[in-house]
């Protein structure tokens, strides 16, 4: 991967879109009450996780409804972004099959004004353009 812009600010200015794909917007609309309710159900979790990555489906399915509700309540009750990701991805609370990309998708789909999806392509671009936070990982 090679740099096409002088800096990350220029890349964002030239490429950032605030419009969602139609299917993504439909899912966001379907999930609009999840945060105010304070948790998501297994059915909602499966929709979000499968939207991001269908490969670990058997792992997603292995999570019980009770576990999903319990963890999602904790996620929505904390104001700390790092903790939200940890609750979804790190033992002892982790949801099976969930890593940072799916966790970030869950946050984005339930709070699109404040979160975006972080996946390998995002990490690569941040690293390429010199993000110190990414370089230290």
Image: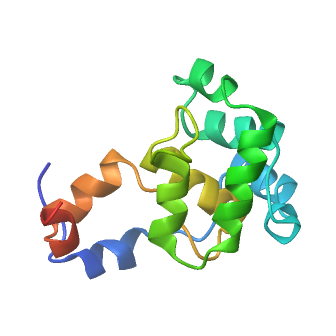
Q: Give the left or right position of residue 81, taking residue 134 as reference.
A: right
Front in this rendered view, residue 4 or 125? 125
Residue 53: x percent and y percent? 54, 33
**Quick one: quadrant of the C terminus?**
bottom left
**Image colouring:** rainbow
Q: Give the left or right position of residue 28, taking residue 106 as reference.
A: right
Front in this rendered view, residue 42 or 18? 42
Asked if residue 116 can be seen in this view, the reply is no
Extreme residue in the top direction? 58
Residue 78: x percent and y percent? 62, 74
Asked if residue 100 can be seen in this view, the reply is yes
Above or below residue 114? Residue 25 is above
Quadrant housing residue 15: bottom left
Residue 103: x percent and y percent? 53, 51
Q: Give the left or right position of residue 124, taking residue 70 as reference.
A: left
Front in this rendered view, residue 97 or 109? 97
- Residue in the picture at 66% in, 23% down: 62
Above or below residue 52? Residue 124 is below
How many numbered badges does the structure rendering display?
0
Above or below residue 19? Residue 102 is above
- Residue in the picture at 63% in, 29% down: 60
- Residue in the picture at 53% in, 45% down: 102
Above or below residue 16? Residue 92 is above
- Residue in the picture at 54% in, 64% down: 84
Residue 61: x percent and y percent? 69, 24
Quadrant housing residue 12: bottom left
């Amino acid at each position: 991967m090679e740099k096409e812009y002088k800096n990350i600010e220029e890349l964002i200015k030239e490429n950032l879109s605030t419009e969602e794909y139609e299917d993504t917007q439909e899912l966001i609309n379907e999930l609009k009450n999840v945060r105010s309710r304070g948790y998501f159900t297994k059915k909602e979790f499966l929709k979000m996780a499968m939207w991001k990555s269908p490969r670990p489906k058997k792992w997603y399915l292995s999570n019980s409804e009770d576990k999903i509700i319990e963890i999602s309540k904790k996620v929505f009750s904390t104001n700390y972004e790092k903790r939200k990701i940890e609750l979804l991805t790190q033992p002892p609370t982790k949801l099976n099959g969930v890593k940072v990309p799916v966790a970030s998708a869950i946050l984005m789909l339930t709070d699109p004004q404040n979160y975006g999806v972080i996946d390998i392509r995002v990490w690569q671009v941040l690293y390429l353009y010199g993000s110190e936070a990414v370089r230290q990982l």
